[in-house]
Image (cartoon, helix red, strand yellow):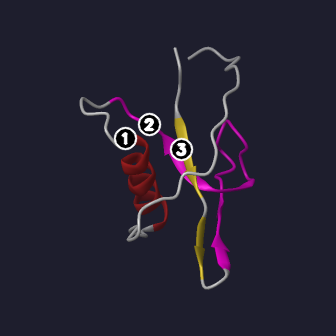
């Protein structure tokens, strides 16, 4: 089983938008982070990462993405906890 997450760095007028994760979060609670979240399984997978990122940014900080997202990097790592 794979879990796919997306994160986005938002920059405007030379400033970056980051969030402080809730202290109750299991992963990295209380730390500063980029905005993002888990990709939900959908029927139509075209541009699923971009849609997920736009949704997460709007849900977490109320910002709508106007000019789309620029893909920068991906990585993978083993998930050592039970799901």
| Residue 66 x %, y % | 38, 71
Q: How many other residues sit within 10 Å of disc 2, few (<14), some (14-19) or many (≥20)?
A: some
Verify CB contact (< 8 Å) between mark 2 and mark 3: yes
Give the CA separation, mark 1 to mark 3: 10 Å
- Residue 28 counted in the magenta span: yes
Q: Which residue lies furthest to the bottom in this view?
A: 13
**Residue receiving disc 1:** 48
| Residue 46 x %, y % | 31, 38
Verify CB contact (< 8 Å) between mark 2 and mark 1: yes
- Residue 78 counted in the magenta span: no
| Residue 65 x %, y % | 41, 67
Q: Earlier in the sequence, mark 1 or mark 3?
A: 3
Give the CA separation, mark 2 to mark 3: 7 Å
- Quadrant of the image occupied by residue 63: bottom left
Q: Which residue is nearer to you in this view: 64 or 29?
A: 64
Residue appearing at x 42%, y 68% in the figure: 62
**Residue receiving disc 2:** 39
Q: Which residue lies furthest to the left in this view?
A: 43
- The magenta segment is 15-41
Q: Is residue 49 left or right of residue 29?
A: left
- Quadrant of the image occupied by residue 83: top right
Location of residue 70 with respect to 61 vertically, above or below? above
Q: Which of marks 2 and 1 is nearer the N terminus?
A: 2
Give the CA separation, mark 2 to mark 1: 8 Å
């Amino acid at each position: 089983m794979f879990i796919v997450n997306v994160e986005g760095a938002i920059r405007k007028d030379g400033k970056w938008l980051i969030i402080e994760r809730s202290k109750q979060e299991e992963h990295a609670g209380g730390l500063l982070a980029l905005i993002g979240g888990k990709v939900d399984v959908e029927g139509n997978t075209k541009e699923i990462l971009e849609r997920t990122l736009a949704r997460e940014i709007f849900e977490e900080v109320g910002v709508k993405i106007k000019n789309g997202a620029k893909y920068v990097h991906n990585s993978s790592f083993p998930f050592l906890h039970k799901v």
